[in-house]
Amino acid sequence: MRLKDKVVIVTGGARGMGRAYSIALAREGAKVVVNYANRKDAAEEVVQEITRAGGQAVSFKADVGNRSEADNMVDFAIGTYARLDVMVSNAGVVHKASLLEHTEQDIDRIFHTNVKGNIFCTQAAARVMMKQKSGKIILCASIVAVVGEPLLSVYTASKGAILAYTRAAAVELAPYQINVNCVLPGTTKTDMSKDVLADPVVAKALIDPIPLGRLGTPEDLVGIVLYLASDEAAWTTGQSFIVDGGHTMK
């Protein structure tokens, strides 16, 4: 097992890509803290699926955009499993609106989770990992950080911020043997995108630019996360990995 006895936190770990990450990391031997903000039932379902398969997992409620709650989440992981090896900062929110129609409330909500959440999770994890002189931090952005898409200007800004933050954090934490990398998924079929993809016209418009001819699934993102969480990525840091079926290469 690539991650035997490693302790991992997955934020937003109850649904969509976070759920797939939690289950896959546990399958590789990790002890997983499944974070959730609202859906305790979904988080517990993930924990039960992992434990039924012989793995170890617990759930923890935290709003990652709140510094004290992010700190409490890491303290919980340490109290439960005595260390923290990997932080997968996956939690995020999206809101579609034209550039002129984004309200201050929309902007605050998006940046609260997508920017502050990634920063606070990195800080909380780094405090522990710096003492251990080891650790992996995996941040999550989106291909919209590198390609323009209509109706997503604020979401795009939040994800672009994470690309820049990844590079800076990687340099600053490298002396402590902490790797910081970022995953940029393309359009993926999750609960978050379900309503949008229900429109066949919209779905076709999203699929057409993808050379591999289909939307992604959460399982399509699992491989890169497992790599970045493992010792195989010991010499990989400050990098951004696009997983999008080829969308951005055209």
Image: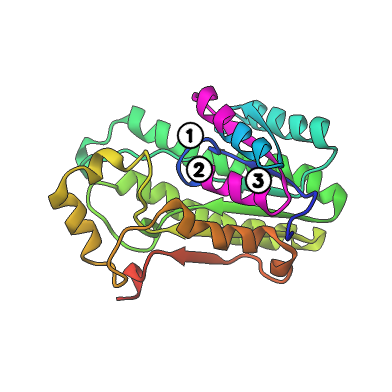
Identified at 48% across, 55% down, the residue is: 219
Q: Can residue 45 be seen in this view?
A: yes
Percent across and percent down for residue 212 are 32, 70
Identified at 32% across, 43% down, the residue is: 193
Where residue 195 sits, quadrant-wise, is top left
Task: Give residue 115's mark.
Answer: 2
Q: Give the extent of the magenta segment.
A: 18-45
**Left or right placement of residue 121 versus residue 243 in this view:** right
Percent across and percent down for residue 217 are 40, 54
For the residue labelled by badge 1, is the local secondary structure a helix, a strand or a loop? helix
For the residue labelled by badge 3, is the local secondary structure a helix, a strand or a loop? helix
Q: Distance between the residues labelled 3 and 1?
A: 14 Å
The quarter of the picture where the C terminus appears is bottom left
**Left or right placement of residue 80 versus residue 50 in this view:** right
Task: Give residue 122's mark.
Answer: 3
- In the depicted structure, whether residue 105 falls above or below residue 121: above
- In the depicted structure, whether residue 242 falls above or below residue 222: below
Frontmost residue, 43 versus 240: 43
For the residue labelled by badge 2, is the local secondary structure a helix, a strand or a loop? helix
Q: How far apart are marks 2 and 3 (CA)?
A: 11 Å
Looking at the rendered structure, the kind of residue marked 3 is Thr
**Left or right placement of residue 104 versus residue 219 in this view:** left
Q: Can residue 63 be seen in this view?
A: no
Q: Mark 1 points at which residue?
A: 112
Q: How far apart are marks 2 and 1 (CA)?
A: 6 Å
Identified at 24% across, 46% down, the residue is: 197
Looking at the rendered structure, the kind of residue marked 1 is His
